[in-house]
Image (cartoon, grey):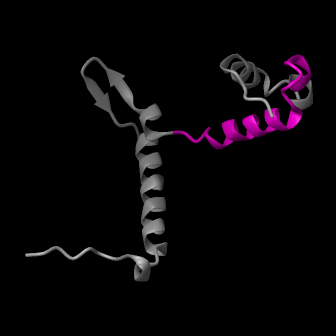
Amino acid sequence: MAKLSEIEKYYIDSHRETMTAKEISDKMRKAVTEDEVEGYVQHLKENDIPKASDSMSRQVGVVVMTEGASSIGDEHGEQVRQQEVDLNTSTIHRIKEEK
């Protein structure tokens, strides 16, 4: 299994919309397989989730939260709260401190 170089990753990122994984792997060195290209494309798709910081309005010395950034932050906060509810508190132990 070949490790993708930065140039190969850039090429995959640039051509993933217009070419299939098979076509991309054929253009690269022989060690790069179709499965590796598909895996990297899947990794890119999973990480395409927008972040609140991408939606901030910036000027010199000032950052303003836009409506889009606020809604992204609210959605993330709801996910975190849901994860906290799902925690199994019976397995959480606190270390007793000596007085």
Q: Position of residue 72 (x, y in %)?
A: 47, 47
**In-image side of 58 versus 51 (left or right):** left
Query: Which residue is at 47% across, 68% downward?
Result: 82
Q: Main secondary structure of the magenta part?
A: helix
Considering every residue shown, the one lying at the far left of the view is 99
**In-image side of 72 versus 98 (left or right):** right
Magenta-span inclusion, residue 72? no
Q: Position of residue 7 (x, y in %)?
A: 70, 16
| Location of residue 85 (image quadrant) | bottom left
Query: Which residue is at 7% across, 75% downward?
Result: 99
Instruction: In this rendered view, identify the residue nearer to me: 29 or 44.
Output: 29
Considering every residue shown, the one lying at the far front of the view is 98
Query: Which residue is at 26% across, 74% downward?
Result: 95
Picture mark count: 0
**In-image side of 86 versus 9 (left or right):** left
**In-image side of 41 versus 98 (left or right):** right
| Location of residue 20 (image quadrant) | top right
Instruction: In this rendered view, identify the residue nearer to me: 24 or 53.
Output: 24
Magenta-span inclusion, residue 27? yes
Instruction: In this rendered view, identify the residue nearer to me: 67 or 21.
Output: 21
* Region in magenta: 25-50
Query: Which residue is at 84% across, 24% downward?
Result: 18
Q: Where is residue 28 in the image (x, y as percent from the top left)?
A: 85, 18
| Location of residue 49 (image quadrant) | top right
Dividing the image into 4 quarters, which one contains the N terminus?
Answer: top right
Rendered view: 60 above or below 19: above
